[in-house]
Image (cartoon, coloured by chain):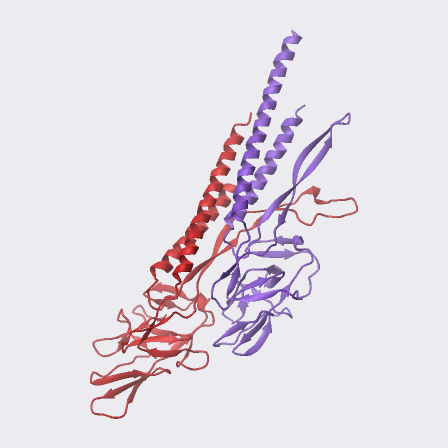
Chain colours: A red, B purple
Amino acid sequence: MRSLTTAATGMLAQQLNVEVISNNIANLSTSGYKRKRAEFQDLLYQSMERVGSRSSDNGDITPAGVQIGVGVEAAAVYSITDQGNLQPTGNTYDMAINGKGYFQIDLPTGGTGYTRAGSFQLSPDGQLVTNDGYPVQPGITIPSDAVEVTINDSGEVLIKLDGQIELSNVGQLEISTFPNEGGLESIGQNLVLETEASGSPIVSVPGQPGFGKVLQGYVETSNVDVVKEITDMIQAQRAYEMNSKVIETSDQMMGTITNIR
Amino acid sequence: MQNTSYVGISRLNALSRQMEVVANNIANADTTSFKGERVMFSEYVQKIGRGDKVAFVQDQATVMNFSEGNMTFTGNDTDLAIQGKGFFALNTPAGERYTRSGNFRVGIDNKLISLNGDEVLDERREPIILPNSYNEITITKGGAVVVDGTEIAKLGVISFPNEQALNKTQNGMYRYSGPTPDMDKPENTQLLQGALEGSNVNSIAEMTKMIKIQRAFEGTHKLMEQEHERMRRAMQVYGKTGQ
């Protein structure tokens, strides 16, 4: 009975579906989180071509043969990169990107990570770092005697020193975009890595054509839609149950065969 | 004399084949653009002499149901659903394949590709290449790919006179064995950006079908058992007369 294993592939697929959904719901208030979606594909088909498929003597052929599919497989779990809401925090070093792009982060293991969660802090020596203390690339250091820090749309970091009237520029934030954002690899801590599927990063200053603008005092919330996730979860659970019912029925049919005399 | 049992076996075979198709439908109840299938049965009549005939059952074909699945909105710019008849064309290593799964991505060389990495073809059967960086990609209902206000290509949509002539391969793709058709989008077919076509499997219908299959299976088993019993008794009776 092929239907036993076919239904088992269905149960595995739905289990993965629920795992992806539960991770989305768990990250409902993670800043910069992009919701994931599990995508499924049908597995290969076994053709049982029949001698009897010729329907008449003058060569007419019934167009469809008997094809039996053997189940379903998970094809991909990809991120949906639409914009999350922009939530005002009033924090000087909170930055959201309105549009496309990722901040670049120096990883302690070497290499560059990318993030849209722009809730940054200052390190003891005044450097702009993430919540985990990883420095933002290119490095920006805020002098300790700065009384006001402004970051404009195009990512220029301007400070006002005590007693001075003019603002002075202490750095320029840069952001990266990718040809295929869905191909980025998530590694946790709100970070993603470049992969062969995502393509190489294209670095530019914010506000250029094709790049988003930086908004100071805001963070980007996750783009998870709870109502959608919950309905998806209900659907996945029911589909799981139906597949298990198929296994049960196939088992009973096999029981019947065993009893043939 | 054994014909009753053989007819029963042909029925059991056909039913278990049908069960496999139902299991595949249910397993793919959440697969993008999956088209449900059903088995078509036909009689296979055999003459057994003196004008008597016995009809066996044979599963002649699996027929695909090409009705449209539900639209699910994903919010992804390169997800496309076809409303109405038609298929996207993909350039695969094994030749041209057709699909209704519009879950496309942008590949490393900026080409629009399917989930399995095959190029999506435009009207002229060329791959669609997007610029390096852009703000916005819009795909119109007519299939025009517009990047930041400039139309760069038109997606190819193919329709077939007889969709049953398509063969399912895997991963939501179909093969067409006839002459390669032209890229002419049917007039009332529209593309929907940011949505995917769901599976068109009706779970309620499949579950009830499954129950029916199981009952028919048990019924046929019962018939074979009674036939066995009848023969056993007949042998007892004839055996006695012979003494």
Where residue A133 sits in the image (x, y, percent)?
26, 71
Residue found at the very far right of the displayed protein: A58
Where residue A181 sits in the image (x, y, percent)?
44, 69
Where residue A85 sits in the image (x, y, percent)?
37, 70
Residue at left offset 42%, top offset 50%: A15
- Quarter assignment of residue B210: top right
**A150 in relation to A111, above or below:** below
Please state, as top left, top right, bottom left or bottom right, where the C terminus of chain A lies in the image: top right
Where residue A39 sits in the image (x, y, percent)?
48, 58
Q: Is residue A20 visible?
A: no
Residue at left offset 59%, top offset 37%: B15
Residue found at the very far top of the displayed protein: B243
- Quarter assignment of residue A121: bottom left
**A143 in relation to B57, above or below:** below
Number of numbered labels in the structure image: 0
- Quarter assignment of residue B45: top right
**B28 in relation to B140, above or below:** above
Name the one closer to the observer, B38 or A260: B38
**B119 in relation to B225, above or below:** below
Q: Is residue A187 visible?
A: yes
Residue at left offset 29%, top offset 69%: A108
